[in-house]
Image (tube, rainbow, N blue to C red):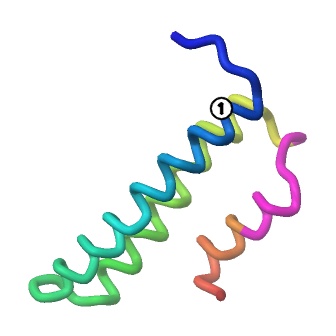
Amino acid sequence: MLNTTGTSRGVLLMLGFCILAPLLDASTKLATEAIPVGQITAARFVFQGLWQIPCIARNGLGAINAISVAMIEKTCFHSG
């Protein structure tokens, strides 16, 4: 595994997101032909919530900051 600094790790994560986000949106648009939009949206929110569990388990509840709280609210309440 590469020994990277926090900055280069952040840059790599951002590049990965910039590649994957449009692919997720495109696959969602294609899937709406066969699957109802509400079901796709619900699945995306469920996976967002499940993705947060290992992060919280690894870093503890003390690591939750304002951004994490906003993500949890979005996942739970489907707001904005």
User: Does residue 15 sit above or below 32 in this rendering?
Assistant: above
Magenta stretch: includes residue 64: yes
Q: Relative to 34, is 56 above or below?
A: above
Does the magenta stretch mainly form a helix, a strand or a loop? helix
Q: Classify 10 Å Cα crowding around label 1: few (below 14), some (14-19), many (20 and above).
A: few
Q: Nearer the viewer, residue 44 or 7?
A: 7
Q: Position of residue 35 (x, y in %)?
A: 17, 83
The residue closer to the viewer here, 8 or 75, is 8
User: Residue 64, image x and y in percent?
Assistant: 83, 49
Confirm whether the magenta stretch covers residue 68: yes
Locate residue 6 relative to residue 76 in the image: left or right: right
Mark 1, residue position? 9
Position of residue 19 in the picture relative to residue 8 (left or right) = left
- Picture residue at 57% right of the left edge, 38% below the top: 12
Q: Amino acid at mark 1?
A: Arg
- Quarter residue 66 falls in: bottom right
Is 47 on the left-hand or right-hand side of 11? left
The residue at 69%/65% (across/down) is 72
Q: Quick one: quadrant of the C terminus?
A: bottom right
* Residue at position x 65%, y 87% in the image: 79
In the image, 26: left or right of 74?
left
Q: Secondary structure at mark 1?
A: helix
Quarter of the figure with residue 42: bottom left
Q: Residue at x 79, y 63 (%)?
A: 69
Magenta span of residues: 62-70
